[in-house]
Amino acid sequence: MPDMKWLRAEYESRKMNAESHVADWHPYSDEAFDPRPLYFESHRYRRGRRLKSDIGASAPYLYGVDGEGRIWVEQQATVFRGQRYETFWVRGPDGPQEAAGYHHTPDKAPIFLDRFSFANGLLAGYEKQAQHGCQRSAYIYERNRLVRIEHATGPTLADLKPFQIEDVTFDALGRLEQILCRQLDSDGREIGTEVRFQARPRNLSAKELKLIFLERFVAAVPAVIAALPNIGAVYCLALAYDPGQFTTLPPILCLGLKERLGDPSYEPWNPATMVQRSLS
């Protein structure tokens, strides 16, 4: 893992430089800014909303902005009075160049350092050094429209391996239609896919969309079971949702086999040890 101690030595200077540009503080209900295109859509985060100014320092997030509305400081509240996570930005002519994040504790231990590179006014590269590993992302465009994001991760920037590719599609009117994430192994081979974002079909209400999902979901379960080979008696059928970084929809169908109940290494109520099939 990267040694971040050197970044702690820069806390005071980065804080002083960033806050010297701040003309006003804007309170938000949650995280509301990230220079990476489609960051909120890809991570399924709801962008924070601007709060009334009189809420002040009690806001979950505070953004320090200059006279042109550009963000230089982000502060995230904690349950500890007077202690906030802090992020300080360094800006260039095209946008943010660096973001340094520090812990809420009094020692202000460094958490991450993000670096951004631009080409023709568009974000082309992103690099993260953090306590728990590193990441590098490349942003690929066609006619100034983002079409792909390639991610690599690893313990250090010198030891990165392929991780994910996000394919981005738009409809004929230029509206975001889908973000499809392809999971890769360390050799760059595809081992799974996940739809990170899917635009709602036009002219469909949320209620109608829910009914369509339920109809397809109910039909998918018996179809998947029918396609299984002869697996013998089943004692349990479960729908498992991935509790990892991204919640999986639709869930994974898991079947517990009676023949495995006598196996000492078998965990009978753990979906990870059961026969699994995707419902997508």
Image: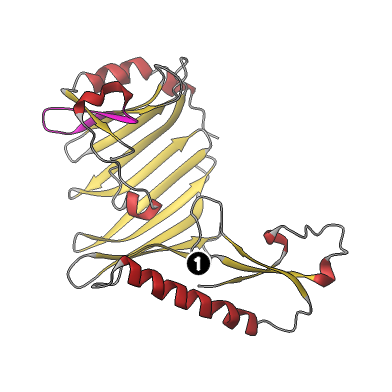
Residue 90 screen position, x and y as percent: 26, 29
Amino acid carrying mark 1 in the image = Pro
Query: What residue occupies the far left of the structure in this picture?
Result: 67
Residue 221 screen position, x and y as percent: 57, 77
Q: Residue at x 28, y 51 (%)?
A: 37
Q: Nearer the viewer, residue 187 or 49?
A: 49
The residue wearing badge 1 is 250
| Picture quarter with the N terminus | top right
Residue 125 screen position, x and y as percent: 32, 47
Residue 232 screen position, x and y as percent: 79, 80
Q: In the image, is 263 to the left or to the right of 54?
A: right
Determine whether 237 is above or below 268 in the image: below
Q: In the image, is 192 to the left or to the right of 226?
A: left
Is residue 72 a member of the stretch shown in magenta?
yes
| Residue 199 seen in this snapshot | no
Q: Secondary structure at mark 1?
A: loop
Q: Identify the magenta region.
A: 59-73
Q: Residue at x 17, y 69 (%)?
A: 173
| Residue 74 seen in this snapshot | yes
Determine whether 223 is above or below 173 in the image: below
Near mark 1 (Cα within 10 A), the count class, few <14, some 14-19 or many ≥20, is some
Determine whether 103 is above or below 279 in the image: above
- For the image, the number of numbered tags is 1
Q: Quadrant of residue 199?
A: bottom left
Colour scheme in use: secondary structure
Q: In the image, is 98 to the left or to the right of 156?
A: left
